[in-house]
Structures are given as C-alpha cells and as structure tokens.
Image (spheres, coloured by chain):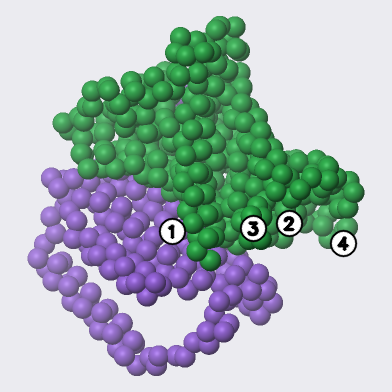
Amino acid sequence: MTLYAFYFLSFLAVLSALMVVFSRNPIYSVLYLVITFVCVGCHYLLLSAEFLFAVHMIVYAGAIMVLFLYVIMLLNLNKEDEAHKSNYLRFAAVISAGLLMMVVVAALRGAEASQVDFSTVSNIGKVKVLGNLLFNEFLLPFEIVSILLLAAMVGAVMLAKTHMKRTAEPTHKKNGRASVANQNITTNIKELTK
Amino acid sequence: MSEVLTFKLILVFAVFGITLLVAMYSTYLERKVAAFIQDRVGPDRAGPFGLLQPLADGVKMFMKEEIIPNVSNKTLFIIGPCIAMLTAIMAGVVIPWGGTLEINGTQYNLQIADLNIGILYIFAVVSFGVYGIMVGGWASNNKFSLLGAIRASAQMISYELAMGLSIIALIMITGTLSLSEISSMQGGGIGDQWNLWNIVYQPVGFMIFIICAFAECNRMPFDLPETETELVGGYHTEYSSMKLGFYLFAEYINMFTSSAVMSTLYFGGYNFPFMNDLGLAPNVVTILGTVALFLKIGFFIFFFMWVRWTLPRFRYDQLMNLGWKVLIPLAILNVAITGLVMILTQ
C-alpha cells in the first residue's frame, strides 16, 4: 500500500516538475510547481514526518507559491512580450544545467545507502521529538537561524522604507495623501516598465 | 479493524453531507437573519417558513445559462471554483465531531483522522483556499476580477500571520497540536475534574482569531475581494450558473469549518458543562456532546451573519493597517504575556 502510494506520488511529482519546465504559460508553471510541492509534502507524510509535511504545505505550497502567482499575475507575462533570448544564452543555460546535473549525479553515486533503524523512524517526525531536538541538542544553530531570518526581515523592511521616503517625502506636506499615493503608483509603474 | 474502517467511511460521507447541508441552510439563515435585523419577513414562499428556499436556489443555480468568456483561460476558469470547493471541504477531516461511541465493545471515534498536527493541517488547507480565488480571478481576464483576486491573496496572507500567532499562545497552554487532545482537555464536570474552556485563559487570542477568521472567510466587514461598490463582483464577476454557486458555497463551508475550529479550540468542542455529573451512559453523553458542538457552531455562524448586517465594510488600507499594525503586535504581546504567566505560575 505504502509502496504503491510512493510510486504514484513520485510519478506525479516528476511529471509535474517536468511540466513546470515545459509549459509555455508561466501561470501553469507555478500551478504545476504547487502540485510538485504537494507531492513532496505527501512523501514526508509517508515517512511519518507529519510536522514537516504541515510546515512544507503552509510555507512553500501555501505562502511562497501564492506570492509567486501574485507577481506573475501582475506582470501578466505573455508569449508576445516575452524577451527573446539569444542562442548564446540558451547554450550557456544548457551547459550550466548539465554541469549541475553532473555534480548531483556524482554526489549521489558516492553516497552509501545508509541503513535506517525502523524502530525509531515512526516517531522521528513527531512534534515533541522535533521540539526536544531543536531546543536541546541544536539550540545554538536554531537561534542563529532565527536571528538570520530576523535580519533578512529587517533588511527587506528597510529596503522598502528608503524607497518610500525618497519618493513620498517632499510632496507629503504640500498636497496630502492623495498625491502621495499617486506618486507612489507612478513611480511603481515607471519601475515596472523599465 | 474493518469495522472501524467502514465506520470511518460512513463518517466521511456523513461529515461531507452535513457540511453541505449546513452550508445550504446557512444561505437561508443568512437571508432570515438579514430580514430580522432589517425588520423584514425574508424568504417565506417556498415551503413552510420558506424552508425549501435553499433547494429552489440550488435548482435556479443549476438551470442558469453557463457563460464562459471568450477571452478567458478556459481550463483555469473551470478549475478555479473546483479548487475553492475542494479546499473548503478538506478541513473537516481533523475536527473532532464528538467523543467516542461504544457499540458492541468496539470504540468508535467521531473524528475522521486524529493527526497530531491537527491545527497545522487546518492552516495548510486554509492557505490553499486562496488558490481557488486567485486562479478564478486571473482566468476571467477581467480587470475587476484580477483586482479582487489580488486583494484576496494579500488579505489572506496578511491575516494568516496574525491567526497563526494567536494560536501559538493557545498551543503553549495546551502543549499539543492535536485537536482531539485540545478538546478532551476542556472536558469534565464538577464532580471529578473541573476544566475551564480555553476562552477563559485566552480571551485576547480568541478575539484575534475570530477577527482573522472573518478576514479568511472574506466575510463582511472584510469582504474586500468582492466589493460591489468598487469591483462589480470582485473575483467572481465573470462567473455564472453553478460555478458562481461553488464560490458562494465555498464561502459558507469555510464559515462552517471556522466556526467548528473556534468552538473546538476555545469553547470546549464537544464538551458541555456538567457532562460527567448527569450520570448518563457514555454513548448518550457523546451524542449530547455532538449536539452541543453543533449548537456552538450554529451560534458562531449566527455571529458571522450578525456582524455582516451590523458593521460597514472596511477600506483596504484600514484592513491592512488592522492586520499588520494592530493584530500582529497584539498577538506577539499575547504570546509573551502567556509565556510570562506560565513561568510565574509554575
């Protein structure tokens, strides 16, 4: 039963991953990527890592892909206004992708199939086990990662803020909120059309 | 084993049917509540007290002409409402609809799947719900639909954060993510063990949660994705017939599930006061508990409607300010205070 589920999910994951690359419409690509993420998440479930499954679904399939979709919908990429890439670029892309694949294959070939102790695997993904590990054994890396994320967040806010100041501040006192909003929109449009 | 499996299968169909039935009669109730608040009679033509009105509405929806715009993306146009409906129904799986029934010595749990990450599963399903709106709104190839879809996604992502943070304080108190454990922790009667409902410990968390639930369900006062005054019909402007029906239905199902989640997390779930002191058989208590849960859900659905016909709609910048500048800091403060109190009382 589990084996069949694994084969089915793997097939679906690989198929939709290929469709991400091959579909012409970027919206379809994003939706296929969502399906890929769901399939990978279900693999976690098969490994009884329920917490990882839920977090994967919420963060990747739920939040990040919605933002992807958001941006692509706003840009409204069509076949007509897709920038033509020169053959030179395509050639470079193929070579770098091939090199990456070589690295991955080499890494996988050298790896030994590690033996998994199935007596402990059933509760390894449980929230309590994971929480104990994170807050005892891996406390320092965990805290460092959280500080890194916080720094990234503050950085993003600061980037947005300087942009707002530069465009909005001078007119703010003269004309009030409406003109500020207008100016913001015009600068956004200018940046998009660049 | 197979008996339990058959029971689960029956339960799946029962939950599915009851969800649809409740959603159907929510539309009737909505119109009746609106009529009551505006001092009107409301629908009263079909059947006694207009009770057959939902059926009439359903037949009307199915019989309407189905229009798919020429310029739309046809596949995604059809998939949109399907995703909305699918994700709306999925959340009912982890909600404990009652305690355990004992028939012929076998224990039957009135919960389809007791995941130990129940709350997170619900969050995952909720975060998927936005795809239905976004895909449908984009595929319509209409500016108003696209604007509605974009508003919906921004609103849902923003309020999911506050919702998740408001839950963290609750999880800190209960120490579990499983909905069935959270439910059973709130049980008890005067005689043996007396447990209070979580609302007593987490009033602020509940306030944040219910506000976010309104935003996640796109209900008034946060129904910005379908503002009639600005966006014609929002994301479902181009939809007609049962596809529109699916979107509207999904909203009512979301309302039902979020009411069920709120009752389970904060209002004791299937527990009711003095349940262990009545001296009734366990099976009777279980059935009464399920009735109690549905009464609580009914109250929350009524509350959703009450608010809809009482408060006017927010402006979009007000909505964003409320989400990011009020609810999220308040939720973080709530987590901090809860942690402090827990350390001090231990």
Instruction: From the top left corner, tell me how far across and down residue A34 is, in percent.
Output: 35, 56
Residues behind callouts 3 and 2 on a single chain = yes
Q: Which element is circle 3 on?
A: loop
- The residue type indicated by label 3 comes to Asn
Q: Name the colour assigned to chain B in the rendering.
A: green
Point out the tag, 3 or 2, that comes first from the N-terminus: 3
Residues behind callouts 1 and 2 on a single chain = no
Disc 2 crowd rating (10 Å Cα; few below 14, some 14-19, many 20+) is: some
Q: Nearer the viewer, mark 4 or mark 3?
A: 3
Kindly identify which residue carries mark 3. B104
Pointer 3 chain: B
Q: Nearer the viewer, residue B224 or B39?
A: B39
Q: CA distance from mark 3 to mark 2?
A: 33 Å
Instruction: From the top left corner, tell me how far across and down residue A111 is, in percent.
Output: 38, 91
- The residue type indicated by label 2 comes to Thr
Kindly identify which residue carries mark 4. B346
Say whether marks 4 and 3 touch (CB < 8 Å): no
The quarter of the image holding the C terminus of chain B is bottom right
Q: Nearer the viewer, mark 2 or mark 4?
A: 2
Q: CA distance from mark 4 to mark 3?
A: 43 Å
- The residue type indicated by label 4 comes to Gln
Q: Nearer the viewer, mark 1 or mark 2?
A: 2
- Residue at 28 percent across and 68 percent down: it is A11
Kindly identify which residue carries mark 1. A60
- Please give the letter of the chain rendered in purple: A
